[in-house]
Every structure is written in structure tokens, then in C-alpha cells.
Image: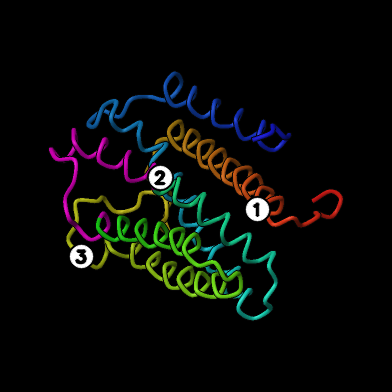
Amino acid sequence: MKPTPLSIAAAIGVVVAFVRVFFFTPTEAIQGLAQKIYYIHVPSAWVAFLAFFLVALTSALYLALREDRLDRIAESSAEVGVVFTTVVLITGPLWGKPIWGTYWTWDARLTLTLFLWFVYVAYMVLRSAVEDRDMRARYSAVLGILGALLIPFIHLSVYLFRTLHPMPILGKPERPSLPNEMLSTFIIAFAAFTLLYVALLRARYRYAVERDGVKLPEGD
């Protein structure tokens, strides 16, 4: 990927977040060093959901407008979303082993997240398997929309089912139950990972444009 101001800013943001996580953020009293995975795991999950939401949105718009640009955005966002979901599925067990005593358990949130990953891997396989451009875009759009329907179930799974996952400590009406230093680090990591997603999405979209032989407008 050719460096751009956006990708450089994203890289700097991630480095700053990691430095703050490991050198300037207190270690959690009960979970110890394992809790620091939180600053990677949760922002990655947020970015994955954001990516798949964009897939669903641009897929729905593609079905309505039939603009190839929307299909390329959906394709690009799905691929980046799978990368971040993979990070979630790797960091989750690494965090779970010292806290839960096991790398994996088939509870609702973990199982649904794994299923979401399979759906979008299937999305990518589908795109490579169908040669007809219009048919590929339409089938992918439908799968991209259906896959995103899992996201609210994943979020609500901790409320609907018995699970080892703790309740959200940030996405609740009252003040987040994190000390200020931890909250500041989380916000920096959250912003850095979001910026990284935008940079990767833009790079992947430009690759799709070049692959399809489309000329971008100046400044795009």
C-alpha cells in the first residue's frame, strides 16, 4: 500500500495507542496484563461492525441504484471487516484463557461472532466464484445485507443469553465504569483503529478501481 497522509496518520495513531496501553495505562488489579488486550479487542470489534454495516448500506444502495462504485465499496469494506473480525477472534481467546480458564466456549456472543466471520468469508468466496459482474454484485449485495443482521444480535446476546462475556462497561446510559486513565487510552485506541479502517478501506477501494480500469475523479 502506497503511504498516504491518511495511512501515515493511522499508523501513528495505532503506535501512540500501543505506547499508551503498555507504558502509560495502569494494569487492572484483577485481570492483570491480560486486560490490556481489551484496548485491541474492543476497538477491533467496533471497526468490524462498522465495516459490515457499510457493506449492508452500500449493498442496499447498489440494489436500488445499480452503481458499480457502491459494489466496490461494499467489496472493499467486507474484506477489511474480515481482517478486523479475525483480530477479534484471535484476541478474544487470548484474553479469555487467563480469565475464564479456556480459550473458547460456545456461548452466544462468541458463536455468533464466529458465524459472522464465516458469513463474510463466504461473501468473499462468492465474489471470486461468480464471473458475471452483475450477478456477482447482486448476490453479494443480498448476502452482505443478510450478514449484517447478525450485528444487533451479537450486541444484545449478553442481555438475552447466559454468557461468560461481561456486560458492556462503555455502551450504557450512565457514566462508563472505567478509571479516567483507562478510558482515555481506550478512546485513543478507538479513534486510531477507526482511522486505520478508513485508511485500509480507501486503499482497498483504490485497488478495486484500478483492477476494474476505472478512472477516479481528481482528489478522490
Question: Magenta segment range?
Answer: 86-110
Three-letter code for the amino acid on which mark 3 is drawn: Phe
Three-letter code for the amino acid on which mark 2 is drawn: Val
Q: Which residue is mark 2?
A: 42
Along the line of sight, the residue nearer the viewer: 93 or 141:
141
Task: From this view, report whether residue 4 is shown above or below residue 213.
Answer: above
- Mark 1–mark 2 distance (CA, rounded to whole Å): 29 Å
Q: Which residue is mark 3?
A: 161
Q: Position of residue 112 (x, y in %)?
A: 29, 61
SS at circle 3:
loop
Task: From this view, report whether residue 115 is shown above or below residue 11.
Answer: below
Q: Is residue 53 magenta?
A: no
Task: From this view, report whether residue 45 is shown above or below residue 146.
Answer: above
Query: What residue is drawn where x is 19% and y is 57%?
Result: 107
Q: Which residue is mark 1?
A: 208
Q: Which quadrant would residue 172 be assigned to in this image?
A: bottom left
Along the line of sight, the residue nearer the viewer: 103 or 160:
103
Q: Mark 1 near mark 2, Cβ–Cβ under 8 Å? A: no
Three-letter code for the amino acid on which mark 1 is drawn: Ala
For residue 134, side relative to residue 47 (left or right)? right
